[in-house]
Amino acid sequence: MGKIVKVVATVAAIAAAIPTGGTSLLALGLGVSSLAAAAIAVGLSVGASLLNKPDAPKNSPEALDRLRANLDPRTPRKTAVGITALATDIRDEEFTDDQTYFHRFIVCASHKVESIDEIWFDDKRVWTSSGGVEGEASGYLTVATRLEGSSANAINISSRMGSTRRYTGLAYVHLRYKLTGNSKKAESPYAQGITTRITIRGKGAEFYDPRLDSTVDGGSGSHRADDQSTWDWDDDACRNPALALLFYLLGYRITNPSTSEELLAVGKGIPADRIDLESFAIAANICDEEIGKVGGGTEPRYRCDGVWSEGDDPTTVIDMLKATMNADLDDVGGKLRLTVFHDDLVDVAAEFDDGDILDGFEWQAVPPLDQTYNVVQGAYTDPSNESLYQQVDYPLQEKDSPDGIDRIETFNLPMVQSAGQAQRLAAMRLERQTFGGTFSAEFQATAWKVQKNSVVKLSFAQTAFVEKLFRVAEMEIRQDGVVPLTLVEENAAIYTPPSLAAAIAPVASTPYDRSKDPLVQVILASEQNLIATSSQPGLTVTATDTAITISDHFRQYTDLTVAVTGDTLDEDVDTNPIAAETRYYLYYDDPDRAGGAVTWYATESFNEAQTKASTPGRHFAGYITTDVLGGGGTGGGGAVPPGSGGVNPPEYEP
């Protein structure tokens, strides 16, 4: 027995390597035979088991790293799943056209993605797939997207691009920034700097779904685990954490364009026949079950959205995904099996009593106090436009402490984008510890009928158990027929959904206002001054009792002169008919100082006609008082005094 225990400890310490071939996943690379591996353990967990009071799972740093674009050509490949912020790995940068343009190539995933939908710089959306460039980026930003790079769709911006930067098999974005202004008075929003706070929102990898595979028990459809061309996108299925974990285990391959060889790009590349596909189908169905959500209505029980890296330890990725669905991944008979813990307590696999236990036993009803916690708190990912995929706290789950001292467990869920799902997972973690009794003993061969994670009942006189519910947390099958079992207490309360609290409401930040930039203000002030000090050679203004006529003329600034086309107005700026015996002030808006066929307006408000901070492109032309009703016409003047750009004419009567 001592030898067996020692070997089990060794296997448990290194099982996370996840070998990719051989008869048994545990036997490979561990220096033991398949038979010995089977004798050592049945259903050994890959990564931490939620039944054994694990530490909170480690998480990929990519959940935060993706929110800040970084130039690192040697960064590990990234996987993006669900509907989320994709990776932002800058792979190349270059200037062209005498530094008029700056180019960035940003890889969003090292596999094909379903869509790239929006791009945000800092807290402003600058591009959508449906509407193109918007806001202050208009005229200064060009966006091209590739859902799956190839030689046929390579973007060639210079002699070294296109032929050497094809990004084969990768999803990426090409951003072209114009660094110079589009006119004399304009400045590019990217002239002084380009942000690296970039959010690229999209839909990630296409998944294989064993429920749509007719070769899998219970499946129906054309999906095949070994044929990526049969995988496709579904807004629900491709956010299912069971299928996301299956995608990681199967891996994704890119075709070498030179040799046509299929090369593993992301994931582990485990053959499909080494995976219990039916267990993943069952787990996916549990994840799809509808459950109440914050604010009313329902949502799927478990969803996952996010990014991880090939540089992450496999156990980090696996534990992170398991945590999103309260699951366990283990090796049973040489196949990886997924179990999502849920209220299946009526499905009792075996009932044991005193006669099934061979030797001594150990019963720990309550864990030591210093190994417990009464508060579970942490963060989830908020996908709102205000938070843009930053991690924010979900409402904590707590119970009274036995000694009045709060002991806190931090349980972060970066792959979860629902505050309700985060609360439910945290509550189950807390309740699992509440019912944390552990029973260990050696059982007869009658225990062969159970598997790891099976629900059992135990009646045992020495502890006064009467059909007490347990779940198999650990088991061994020895060649002598003895089956050591570790059972963990079970209770329906573990799976009872908690009362959900509303998440912390995100508060929109104050966006950067370029108009307050000192350089922009200097430019605007200069333009206002040029307009305000301009003159109008050739301008005449006449009026009847119903209309005002403005002649063609020139607008002369200190740096240029432009021709301006006149007009006849029979309505004022508010579309009221021109009235008799009324003073009107005339103006047009021309911020580019281009002249030509401008749109003229007449107003009775002197201030409305003036060039000022709120109307920097406004050109005051003059004023006139219309004739008496039925009169023969009157004459007016231009800006008074000449060259002033316009002052209040009551002070300078003609």
Image: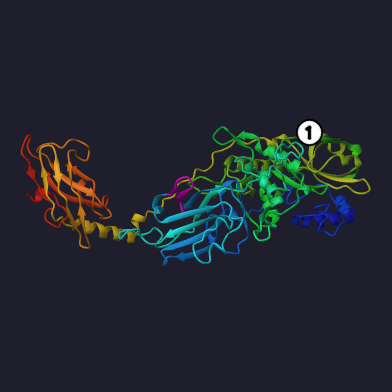
| Whole-percent x, y for residue 35 in the image | 89, 52
- Viewer-proximal residue, 166 or 384? 166
- 547 inside magenta stretch: no
Q: Residues within 10 Å of mark 1 (few under 14, many from 20)?
A: few
Q: Count the marks.
A: 1
Residue where numbered disc 1 is placed:
347
SS at circle 1: loop
220 horizontally vs 136: left or right? right
473 horizontally vs 33: left or right? left
Measured along the vertical axis of the image, is residue 50 above or below residue 193? Answer: above
| Residue at the limit of the structure toward the left, as seen here | 632
- Viewer-proximal residue, 316 or 144? 144
**Residue 138 visible here:** yes
The residue that appears at 72% across and 46% down in the rendered structure is: 225
| Whole-percent x, y for residue 302 in the image | 64, 40
- 132 inside magenta stretch: yes
**Residue 434 visible here:** no
The structure's colour scheme is: rainbow
3 horizontally vs 124: left or right? right
Q: Which residues are magenta?
A: 121-133
Q: Main secondary structure of the magenta part?
A: strand
Residue 631 lies in what quarter of the image? top left
The amino acid type of the residue labelled 1 equals: Asp
| Whole-percent x, y for residue 162 in the image | 54, 62
- Viewer-proximal residue, 477 or 277? 277
| Whole-percent x, y for residue 481 in the image | 92, 45
